[in-house]
Amino acid sequence: MIEVGTIVETKVFWIDRDLLKAYANASGDQNAIHQDEAFAKSVGLPDVIAHGMLTMALVGKFVTDFSGGSATVKEFSGRFTKPVIVPAGEKVDLTVSATVTEVVGNDVRLDISATSAGVKVLGMAKALITMAPGR
Amino acid sequence: MLNPDSVGRTFTGADVVTVTQSEIDAFADVLGESDKSVAPPTFSIRITLAQSQQLLSDPDVGLDWTRLVHGDQKFQIHRPIVAGDQLRCSSTIENYKVAAGNEIVTVRSDLHAGGQLVVSTWSTLVVRA
């Protein structure tokens, strides 16, 4: 039973440099700050950072795992509050959880939390989904 | 700096982008999504980013894409994108302000298939001072 206050179980995604390269190719966003450490540092970043839209895409996967597939999302939004920093040779976490804030028929609104290394990386993250049959 | 006359203008792309199954597969694979019958919810960024960048790089618009940071993003999805969709992008600068020397631009991009609106996206882009 999904009702206001229902908590969607926390899920952890792991992000590494290989995933950034795969996402760059899949999305067409080849900005060097997501692949080239020397370039990232030259523009004042601490290290290579993940594409904000990769973070959002993984949060989207979290949402659709709950709602029952990619076709269920009607609205999805978020603010890129801090970058996900991805050092060479490391896997960094993207830890996602959510709370149900509204239920109207099969339509459900979620408030989503997303952190990496304990830091909030996506603010004001919200989704409106239509639960798939049987969910 | 952005040309103030650009605010409120809509730029419609000349290109119709045909979505392929292999593009959907590649995007879904990155996310570990096994159902590839429809595109993941954020897939449209693949199209709108390139299209709106092309449209808004017009010298008359004056947006400096080299110093750009993505501030926030919203999707309104009317139906999922599927392979074979032929999408045309139109981008509108909905809002523009300058704060502490940074330019803050909100761009709305609509993807239409024929006459049907498929996805609307809003991107807030910050051009750092």
Image (cartoon, rainbow, N blue to C red):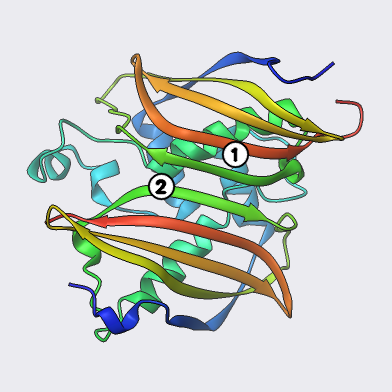
Query: Identity of the amino acid at label 2?
Result: Asp
Q: Nearer the viewer, mark 2 or mark 1?
A: 2
Q: Is residue B102 left or right of residue A133?
A: left
Sooner in the amino-acid sequence: mark 2 or mark 1: 1
Q: Is residue B73 left or right of residue B22?
A: left
Query: Identity of the amino acid at label 1?
Result: Asp
What chain does badge 2 belong to? Answer: B
Identify the residue at horizontal 28%, vertical 28% (top origin).
A85
Tell me if mark 1 has few (under 14), some (14-19) or many (20+) residues whose alpha carbon lies within 10 angstroms of its own. some
Q: Quadrant of the C terminus of chain A?
A: top right
Q: Quadrant of the N terminus of chain A?
A: top right
Q: Secondary structure at mark 2?
A: strand
Identify the residue at horizontal 47%, vertical 81% (top origin).
B10
Question: x, y percentage for residue B50?
Answer: 43, 66
Question: x, y percentage for residue A133?
Answer: 91, 33
The residue tagged 1 is B29
What chain does badge 1 belong to? Answer: B
Quarter of the view holding residue B17? bottom right
Determine whether label 2 and label 1 are within 8 Å by CB.
no
Tell me if mark 2 has few (under 14), some (14-19) or many (20+) residues whose alpha carbon lies within 10 angstroms of its own. many
Instruction: Name the mark on residue A10.
Output: none
Q: Are marks 2 and 1 on the same chain?
A: yes
The residue tagged 2 is B72
Q: Is residue A102 left or right of residue B95?
A: right
